[in-house]
Amino acid sequence: MGRRPRGEGSVYYDAARGCYVAAIELGRNPETGRRVRRKVSGATRTEVRDKLAELLGEKRRTGTVARRDVTVESVMRDLLANPPRGWRSPVTVQVNTSHAERIIAGLGKARMVRVTVADVERFLRRLADEGYSTSVIGATKRLGARAVRRAMRDGLAARNVFELAEVPDGTRKRSRSMTLDQIRALFASDLTPFWRAYLAVGICCGLRPGERTGLVWDDIDLAAGVIRVRHSLKALPGPDGRLVLQLAALKTDSSRRTLALPRYAVAALRALKTAQAADRLRLGPLYADEGLVFCRPDGRPYWREAVRLGFRRVCKRAGIGEDWTPRELRHSFVSVLSDAGVDIEDIADAAGHSSSTVTREVYRHQIGDKVARAAAAMDQIFGTGSAR
């Protein structure tokens, strides 16, 4: 049989390996100058010719031929080892690592050239069957698509099967909000100044958990009854690489907001400020005055887990059960305002959402100057009150 036309590859028998081999030339590597070839093998000449036809078809479609030995795991590991510049937060790295490990567990051993869209969709459906939420499944798919885009850039994949796959419906966790009776039971319980103020700011102002622990006294004007939400407390890498708690500016204009404080919250914050002054006097130079509103008795910030555990104990003592999270105070804020007839646009402004559409999507089950109207509604519900 004559030679194949130039550029159409070659087929030959490899005696050392005992099989037929087909090879296709892809030019030279611009960095090393070496020839780039892709090879496939098979037991018969016909089998190898069919495989060569696949390579040629791929070359015509994409302009190149991806390597045949690259696995899904190697593609995902490369992304984790060389993360995008946007992955600045340790939390972002941790979340994306979880998504990547999920893909590696489900598809890691498969070769990229053999993975189909159907394979990816079966994998995503398994996640749904295992109880993962739609948002987690979608985020897992997007991370896979990002990794494969990089692999395509480097000639390691021919097409992005993750990008083409459809996301199935997963479970949708329904975050709860406290009833008015549960909120009143909380405020009626024996609370420390810290917890009374924390609950008041969470329920009456709707701050996110990180925004609450990121509050500083300089952002609160108790005389004017105004609170400025500017920071969030985050765990970020320190000089030695270990995580440390630091204040970080909020990213969006809608998150940075100024709220009118309900009178109940003003009273609770005054009581907390008095208690902190006593702690400062008692500890003297041992008190680390970082200006935080919600801090430990020695002035230092609380780690999120410590706040969460303490919050559960407070809820248990109030008789409303301990299966609550600090984030659900924010859900309760939206629910209380909605039940009081506050307009959805006003709730969105007070919650720091970019639009009321976000509020409707996130708090759909709780939704039956503008910010000042929200504070007035809280005053009407809880009264002036006095923080103990």
Image (spheres, rainbow, N blue to C red):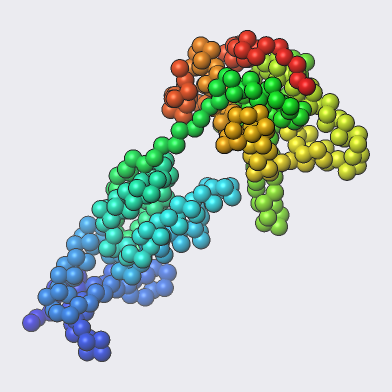
Up the image or down, 364 lies above or below 64; here it is: above
| Place of residue 361 in the rendered image (x, y in percent of width and height, measured from the top left) | 43, 27
Q: Quadrant of the C terminus?
A: top right
Up the image or down, 157 lies above or below 138; here it is: below
Whether residue 255 is visible: no
Whether residue 262 is visible: yes
Q: Quadrant of the N terminus?
A: bottom left
Q: What residue lies at 63% left-to-right and 29% top-to-bottom?
A: 319
| Place of residue 303 in the rendered image (x, y in percent of width and height, measured from the top left) | 68, 43
| Place of residue 206 in the rendered image (x, y in percent of width and height, measured from the top left) | 60, 25
For residue 374, side relative to residue 133 (left or right): right
Q: Place residue 371 in its image quadrant.
A: top right
Q: Place residue 200 in its image quadrant.
A: top right
For residue 44, side relative to residue 366 (left or right): left
Depth check: give the residue in front, 30 or 193. 193
Farthest residue, direction front: 319
